[in-house]
Image (cartoon, helix red, strand yellow):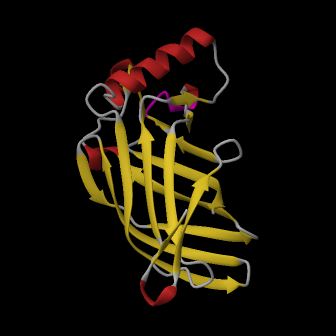
Amino acid sequence: METGTQKGAVLVKFQIDRAVSRFTVQAFATGLLSSFGHSPRVAIRDYEVEIQCIPETYEKAFVRVTVQTGEMEILDEMKRDDRARMEQEMYDKVLDVRHHPAALYESNRITIQKLAPDALTAGVDGELSFHGVTQPLPLQANITVIGTTLRISGNFTLRQSDYDIKPVSVAAGALRLKDELKFTFDLVARRQD
């Protein structure tokens, strides 16, 4: 879908193809028993990404990401019962999806740098509203332009404590997850005409 902007430029929207896109988060175990512990990798399954910009110049670039926090899946191999128990603890105790069903990231400013005709980097200044807290969260992304498709990849970290989330702890603290989480994204966005 296209909408007109000033000076005759046309603002174009892109839609994420979730069938070929990946969005994951990695947690890391720490504590006395961390060598026996589990550092889970979680797939974010239900998310919407709105991207718009003026093609070629990438002016007026904007991104909004909405994640349904109750639709995540632990990717690591483990017994089905263990996975179900760990996912339930993640939903109930860590994310508190009943009270905080979605997270929202919205850009305030995006700076694009062309590295080559089909290779860009994007510096994004934005804010993440997560678990009832809104914090600034700058991002960097690499973008490859393939015709009318964008492949957008990168990673970022955040501290759970910045969003009033207490990291999981078991065995009287001898095994716990670190405060910092690493998010990785590899998204395919197709132009909507």
Which sits in the foreground, 48 or 5?
5
Is 114 displayed left or right of 156 in the figure?
Answer: right
Q: Residue at x 40, y 52 (%)?
A: 158
Residue drawn at the location 63% of the way across and 83% of the way down: 56
Instruction: Give the camera-side residue of 162 and 125.
Output: 125
User: Which quadrant would residue 100 be assigned to in this image?
Assistant: top left
Quadrant of the snapshot with the C terminus: bottom right
Say which residue appears at 48% left-offset and 20% top-offset. 86
**Image coordinates for residue 11, horizontal then vertical, percent:** 51, 74
Where is residue 51 shown, x and y percent of the image? 51, 62
Counting from the top left corner in percent of width and height, residue 18 is at 63, 44
Query: Magenta residues, as a range?
Result: 31-35
Q: Give the left or right position of residue 44, taking residue 191 as reference.
A: left
In the figure, residue 150 lies in which quadrant?
Answer: bottom right
Q: Is residue 116 left or right of residue 140?
A: right
In the displayed orientation, state which residue is furthest to the right. Answer: 147
105 to 149, vertically: above or below: above
- Image quarter of the N terminus: bottom right
Which residue extends farthest bottom? 7
Number of marks in the rendered image: 0
Farthest residue in the top direction? Answer: 81
Q: Quick check: is 122 in the magenta stretch? A: no
Magenta segment, principal secondary structure?
A: loop
180 over 142 or under it: above or below: above
x then y, percent, for residue 135: 27, 57
Query: Residue 173 falls in which quadrant of the image?
Result: top left
